[in-house]
Image (spheres, helix red, strand yellow):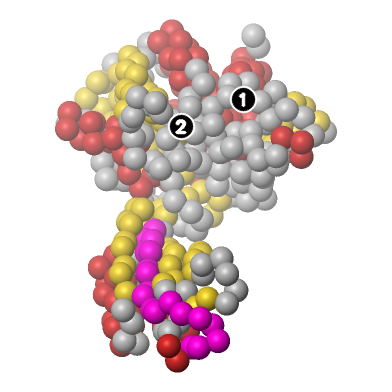
Amino acid sequence: MSSMFAALRLTEELLSRHSVTPVDGGCQDLIVQRLRAAGFECESLVFGPADAPVANLWALRRGSAANGELLVFAGHTDVVPTGPLEQWRTDPFVPSHRDGMLYGRGTADMKTSIAAMVVAAEEFVARHPNHAGSIGLLLTSDEEGPAIDGTVKVCDLLRARGVRLDHCIVGEPTSVDRLGDIIKNGRRGTLSGKLTVKGVQGHIAYPHLAKNPIHLVAPALAELVGIEWDRGNTHFPPTSWQVSNIHAGTGAGNVIPGRVVVDFNFRFSTESTPQSLKDRVQAVLLRHGLDFDLTWTLGGEPFLTLVGSLSNALCAAIEAQTGLKPALSTTGGTSDGRFIAKICPQVIEFGPVNATIHKIDECVDVASIEVLKNIYRDTLERLLT
């Protein structure tokens, strides 16, 4: 196989494996075969229930200066469901080429990045067999799902072992218009709430004999919508609060429901804390005299990597390969970077254009695959040689 097409061919092999979360579909086994040939020690870590196990991979190659810095590539082999198959122009698990684009579920999110990382590591090791420091690879099949038996557990294990990560590149699709225009140096936190407001069920024609919880909660929701939670800062946009769903009713049009359930979510900056947001919501609900239950789920706290050796090396590599000077951003959803940031001081996300992620006919520009691989390899050379 020509080295010029190695990343493309590996991407196609990964796309051919059905790996809808939490299934790995043999992706990690394929990667283990290649990494072991390049001198990596590979450890498969399986967590979760027996009927839906989560596959994780921790791979490590030590250079001549084993006490040097550790740079880790991280990502996920699982993909989201395809959606209606009849709406895809071609089978989502058969890599297909049209007009210079490669189609398939997981092309952008994120099998292309994984293939580029693996081939970049192979090429780097071949060129620099006695490189300084160490190279790691952390993969999971539980990123698109609950994310409870994947990267978070591997990070807990590495912490318990005393493993220190110095740099981590997460292969999330961060580019917007062109490969290399945006990298993520942090992410907002996510905090979800489930609010149940209690009323009294009754006949809709006799409202004086009932208590409508939808009417009761509406003024409180209006107040919450209008609150300025914070103004953000140099690195993060302001905290946002959004209702995602409202559930009420008995299924009959002539019944006042006895309760309403409101699901909502904060995407919060470092100007707010989970506790401060909880306290402010609680105060509004109490002020409106509601009879309620409220449960919270903290999906992840915000993290931020300031400009440093990793971002400088990655930005220099991007500019050398594309001519672009990438902008740093903390927008978008959550990623496994939130777990890795607990054990690694510098975490940056960078990968393909994200315009088609999770969509029907997900795709990437074929020409960008080789460029992405070169950027990852260039970054290794800037940090470990």
3 vs 311, left or right, is right
Q: State which region is magenta.
A: 190-207
| Residue reaching furthest to the bottom | 208
* 356 or 270, nearer to the observer: 356
- Could you tell me the amino acid type at mark 1? Leu
| Residue reaching furthest to the right | 99
* 384 or 162, nearer to the observer: 162
Q: In which quarter of the image is the C terminus?
A: top left
Q: Name the residue under label 1.
A: 15
110 vs 70, left or right, is right
- Numbered label tally: 2
In space, the residues marked 1 and 2 are separated at their CA atoms by: 15 Å
Q: In which quarter of the image is the N terminus?
A: top right
x%, y% of residue 155? 28, 36
SS for callout 1:
helix
Q: Mark 2 points at which residue?
A: 22
x%, y% of residue 211? 42, 84
Residue drawn 38% across and 79% down?
A: 199
First in sequence: mark 1 vs mark 2? 1
> Is residue 196 covered in magenta?
yes
* 238 or 197, nearer to the observer: 197
Q: In which quarter of the image is residue 63?
A: top left
x%, y% of residue 57? 37, 23
Residue 96 badge: none
Bin the neighbour count of mark 2 within 10 Å (Cα to Cα): few under 14, some 14-19, many 20 and up: many
Q: Quadrant of residue 86?
A: top right
x%, y% of residue 345? 29, 45
Residue drawn 32% across and 56% down?
A: 298
